[in-house]
Image: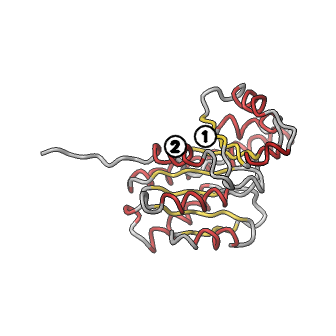
């Protein structure tokens, strides 16, 4: 009985969250914005990746960030140095952003800016490999990061994250010479669960693979519809 109640409660929570996520996506679609949800375990490199991305693409793409963190605005402050709007959301004890929290970030964005001027909104989720994968926030694509320091078997231990990902970034590639890690085995483990996922190996430190990432980001941008006549 207890297990049945818990399962029903979880389903209700996920259903309510999905309704909110669909509503958020409707806003993004109305404004012509692409939303990318960045997810990973703590320390995989989401913030550094965003710094490199904002620096490289800020003159090509109009971007904003909804930054999730449990208690501080440290990461948000790092990103604000690049002159883009950054909406900070503190989740408290919650280990993920949900659609309601992101809706609050969307409303802040709308209050302070014309949302139609933006091409892309990044959501940097809380560092966690479980809950963020289950709670959509209104994104058009999910981006998972996996540091090579986490090992080849991490995708097998946390399958939902990697099954749900549209793009997987294998980060900290510059550390490969110092680690006993089989990158091919890591890739095969991911492909065994998600054969079609885009996989990019990169290093934010050396710059290897970053252009591939930038290209993928630009390929996700919604193009304006041109009407003739």
The residue tagged with tag 1: helix, strand or loop? strand
Q: What element carries label 2?
A: helix
Closest to the camera, between mark 1 and mark 2, is 2
Residue name at image x 42 percent, y 57 percent: 60
The residue that appears at 82% across and 46% down in the rendered structure is 149
**Numbered label attached to residue 167:** 1
Q: Are marks 1 and 2 in contact (CB under 8 Å)?
A: yes
Q: Residues within 10 Å of mark 1 (few under 14, many from 20)?
A: many
Q: Where is residue 10 in the image (x, y as percent from the top left)?
A: 73, 45
Q: Percent x, y for residue 72? A: 73, 72
| Display coloring | secondary structure
The residue lying at 61 percent from left, 33 percent from top is 197
Name the residue carrying label 2.
Answer: 216
- Local crowd size for mark 2, using a 10 Å CA cut-off: few (<14), some (14–19), many (≥20): some
Is 64 rendered above or below residue 208? below
Is residue 82 in view from this perspective? yes
The reply, left or right, for residue 65 in relation to residue 34 is right
Q: What is the CA distance from the residue labelled 1 to the residue labelled 2?
A: 9 Å
Identify the image quadrant of residue 123.
bottom right
**Picture coordinates of residue 6 (x, y %)?**
80, 44
Picture layout, residue 92 above or below residue 60? below
Which numbered disc, 1 or 2, marks the residue that appears first in the sequence?
A: 1
Q: Residue 75 carries which label?
A: none
Report the front residue among 116 and 9.
116
Residue 32 vs residue 8, the one in the foreground:
32
Image quadrant occupied by the N terminus? top right
Question: On the rendered image, what quadrant is the C terminus found in?
Answer: top left
The number of discs equals 2
Looking at the image, the residue that sits furthest to the left is 229
Residue 70 image-quadrant placement? bottom right
């Amino acid at each position: 009985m207890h297990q049945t109640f818990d399962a029903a409660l979880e389903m209700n929570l996920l259903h309510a969250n999905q309704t909110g996520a669909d509503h958020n996506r409707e806003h993004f679609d109305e404004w012509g914005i692409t939303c990318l949800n960045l997810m990973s375990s703590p320390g995989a490199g989401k913030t550094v990746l965003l710094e490199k991305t904002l620096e490289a693409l800020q003159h090509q793409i109009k971007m904003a960030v909804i930054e999730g963190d449990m208690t501080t605005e440290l990461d948000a402050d790092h990103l604000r140095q690049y002159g883009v709007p950054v909406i900070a959301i503190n989740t408290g004890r919650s280990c993920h952003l949900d659609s309601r929290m992101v809706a609050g970030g969307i409303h802040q964005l709308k209050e302070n800016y014309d949302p139609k001027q933006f091409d892309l909104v990044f959501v940097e989720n809380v560092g966690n490999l479980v809950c963020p994968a289950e709670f959509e926030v209104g994104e058009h694509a999910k981006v998972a990061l996996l540091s090579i320091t986490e090992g080849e078997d991490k995708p097998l231990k946390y399958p939902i994250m990697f099954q749900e990902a549209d793009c997987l970034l294998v980060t900290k590639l510059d550390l490969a010479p110092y680690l006993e890690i089989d990158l091919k085995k890591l890739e095969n483990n991911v492909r065994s669960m998600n054969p079609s996922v885009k996989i990019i190996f990169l290093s934010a430190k050396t710059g290897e693979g970053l252009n591939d990432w930038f290209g993928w980001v630009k390929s996700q941008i919604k193009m304006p519809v041109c009407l003739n006549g």
